[in-house]
Amino acid sequence: MAPMATSTTSISSSPRALPRIAVLATGGTIAGSAADSAQTAGYQAGVVGVDKLLAAVPGLANVAHIEAEQVASIDSKDMPLALWATLAGRVDALLASGDVDGVVITHGTDTLEETAYLLHLTVKSAKPVVLTAAMRPSSALSADGPLNLLGAVTVAASPAARGQGVLVAFNNRIHSARDIVKTSTYAVDAFQSPEIGALGWVQDGRVEFQRGVVRPHTSGTPFSVGSVAVEWPVVDIVASYAGASRVMVDALVAAGVRGIVVAGTGNGSIHATLQSALAEAVKKGIAVVRSSRVGSGHVMRNGAAPDDALGFVSAGTLNPYKARVLLMLALASGKSAAAELQPIFDQY
């Protein structure tokens, strides 16, 4: 699905005295609308333009000089990989300019954690990049989008956010793109960093970081979407569960996928029938990464499967969806053997 043509809007009360923040809008619930203000589930995503999103945030012009662009207007469940390439390229171009101090991206909640991690690995700048979203459409009673957008711009305008990689500002908390996951289908505090916790918080114009990001990111990685913008390596996800068969693995192998991520039980453990099929897939040159469906914790290498013997890779603390992002980038960079992939998953 191709992104929409870009449009630009400017808002500021004192452009020379304030940080200059680019707001890139992609749609999502934050730009959703329903006929009934009491409705928070039955709405159309991505129909409200960035101009109206900005207008709904009182005092925003006192925080930063805003240059806004409508990059796309989609429901993020339908996020196309081409839009990832568009976003990464646009972010890099904006941050390379001396006229932009940071970028805020409004996004749907469904795939926000994937987009955020993709940008965390590929953006090449120390300037702040902050994603935000909403659990309630803009038309709803107590819509959470305006406050989340204000928080995101405040974080992006803060010198403390520089060098922290890609961040997510949501419900007054600041999260690292690597750690954050969606944990609720309806609550306004739907995003958490289950294993490690938030990096800090933003409230009433104040930004405080209580810890920093340790793993390499942005300019500290070798990854770029430039090499995969035309054709992404195909990587799919399968799950292990009681009575799992090998049907899905065999179908993916026949379809020519480059990699398979397993949402395993517990410590990434895999049903014996499924494991046998995956071991055969490795022998055919397909990369296999073990993650977990649990939601927190880490997958120990050789902890629940003989990784060395079968050629599997441990995803560590990455959930299946983020493990897929990293595997696609690693495969695109020419790494495919388990011995090459494991250090990448250990590092990023």
Image: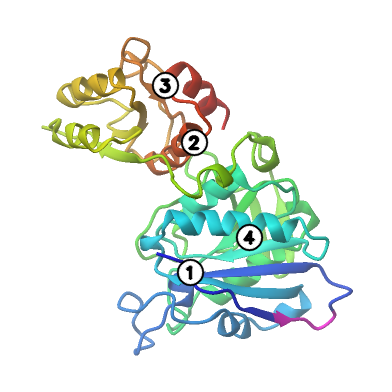
**Going from the N terminus, do you reach mark 1 or mark 3 first?**
1
Label placed on residue 300? 3
CA gap, disc 4 and disc 3: 37 Å
As displayed, is residue 208 above or below residue 232?
below
**Going from the N terminus, do you reach mark 4 or mark 2 first?**
4
CA gap, disc 1 and disc 3: 34 Å
Circle 4: element type: helix
**For the stretch drawn in magenta, what is the main secondary structure?**
loop
**Number of other residues with Cα within 10 Å of mark 2, as a class: few under 14, some 14 to 19, many 20 or more:** many
Circle 3: element type: loop
CA gap, disc 3 and disc 2: 25 Å
Q: Quadrant of residue 298 in the image?
A: top left
Label placed on residue 90? 4
Residue at image mark 2: 332
As displayed, is residue 246 above or below residue 235?
above
**Mark toward the viewer: 1 or 4:** 4
Q: Quadrant of residue 108 in the image?
A: bottom left
Residue drawn at x 31%, y 14% is 310
Q: Is residue 106 magenta?
A: no
Give the amino acid type for the residue marked by disc 1 in the picture. Ala
**Going from the N terminus, do you reach mark 1 or mark 4 first?**
4
